[in-house]
Each structure stands twice: as structure tokens, then as C-alpha cells.
Amino acid sequence: MHNTRHKILSQDEAARLAGKGGVVFTNGCFDILHPGHVDYLQRARDLGSCLVVGLNSDASVRRLKGPLRPVNDEGSRAAVLSALACVDYVVVFEEDTPYELIKKVAPDVLVKGGDWSVDRIVGRDVVEQGGGKVLSIPLLEGYSTTAIVDRIVALHGKEYHGK
């Protein structure tokens, strides 16, 4: 696998992006990457010159999604995200929300998927106080990590033994 480790930053390294201009920030679990994620990340990247993805740690995902998640560990999820051309940097965070990370990065644009209304987006106050924009962009219909996991579980119940 091509080494994209240089794209995975610590929170302190990510803080150096503050004030650079054109920084777009989004966050999520990105457990099983699917076309909906890729479309969303590409459109988020188009909003600036640098896309930073805050990635929920394994412990954070478990608290948010339950004890059986994530399916893929944070190192694997970070590696896959960092391999995408549209993603400039990935930063893992331990908290349930990326609020502290957003304060460090101070992005020009904060974006979440259309299932989040702008008034519910964590970090909105920080970004707007800094003169930035907060956006909710539509998601590609028909894609969901939960639906993928449910399909896998259903197939397993039917003793699927793919090739």
C-alpha cells in the first residue's frame, strides 16, 4: 500500500493549519467507506484548498454506535481516508464530538452531511466567530454504513460463503 502516513496528523500538528486559509473541516466515523462517503468528501474538498477530516477514535465510535462498532479500527480507517486524493489530512480525536479539534484547526469552512442541520453542527460557534462558513451538504442517497453492516449480518445468517 502506498504510504500516506504523512497525511495522518496529531491534533498538535493539525493546529498548525489554523490561519493558513482555505481549510475545510469535516468529521465522522467513516467505518466502512462507501460511495456516499467518497462523494461527500470530494464535495467538501471543493469548498476550499485543504480538507481536514476529524476521525472518531475507536472508543468514541463505540460510545456513539454501540459495542460492536467500529468494524474497522481507527488505524485502518485513517489509512483508507488518507489514501483518498480529496483528503489532505486525517486527525483522530478521542472525544464524542470534534469541538476541541475544531477550536485548534480553526477552519474557514465547517461542513457536515445533509442529515445534520446547520444549527446542530458542533463547532458552528467557533467557525462563525472566526468569520468562517458552516454548511450542511446533501448526501448521496442509498448509502449507509449501518445498512452495509445489516446486509452482512443477514448474509451471515444465510451461511454465505463467498468466493
Image: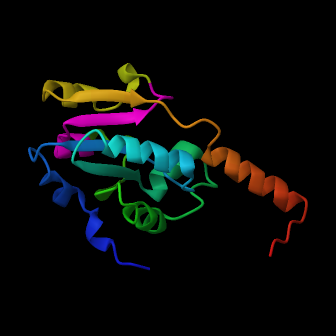
Q: Which quadrant of the view contains residue 69?
A: bottom right
* Residue located 32% across and 46% down the image: 45
Q: Which residues are magenta?
A: 101-116
Tell me which corner region of the image, top left, top right, bottom left or bottom right, holds residue 4: bottom left
Residue drawn at (24%, 35%) of the image: 109
Colouring scheme applied when the structure was drawn: rainbow
Q: Is residue 99 magenta?
A: no
Q: Which image quadrant is residue 96 in?
A: top left
In this rendering, the answer to whether 110 lies above or below 73 is above
The quarter of the picture where the N terminus appears is bottom left
Residue in the image at 20% along x and 40% along y: 107
Q: Position of residue 89 (x, y in %)?
A: 28, 58
Q: Residue at x 29, y 35 (%)?
A: 110
Q: Position of residue 124 (x, y in %)?
A: 28, 27
- Residue 34 lies, in percent from the top left, at 57, 52
Please tell me which residue lies in front, 67 or 104: 104
Task: Name the outermost residue toward the right.
Answer: 158
105 or 143: nearer the eye? 143
Residue 119 drawn above or below residue 136: above
Residue 153, compared with residue 39, is above or below; it is: below
Q: Is residue 100 left or right of residue 31?
A: left
Image quadrant containing the C terminus: bottom right
On the picture, is 4 further left or further right than 38?
left
Q: Nearer the viewer, residue 48 or 16?
A: 48
Q: How many marks?
A: 0
Front in this rendered view, residue 87 or 115: 87
Q: Is residue 103 magenta?
A: yes
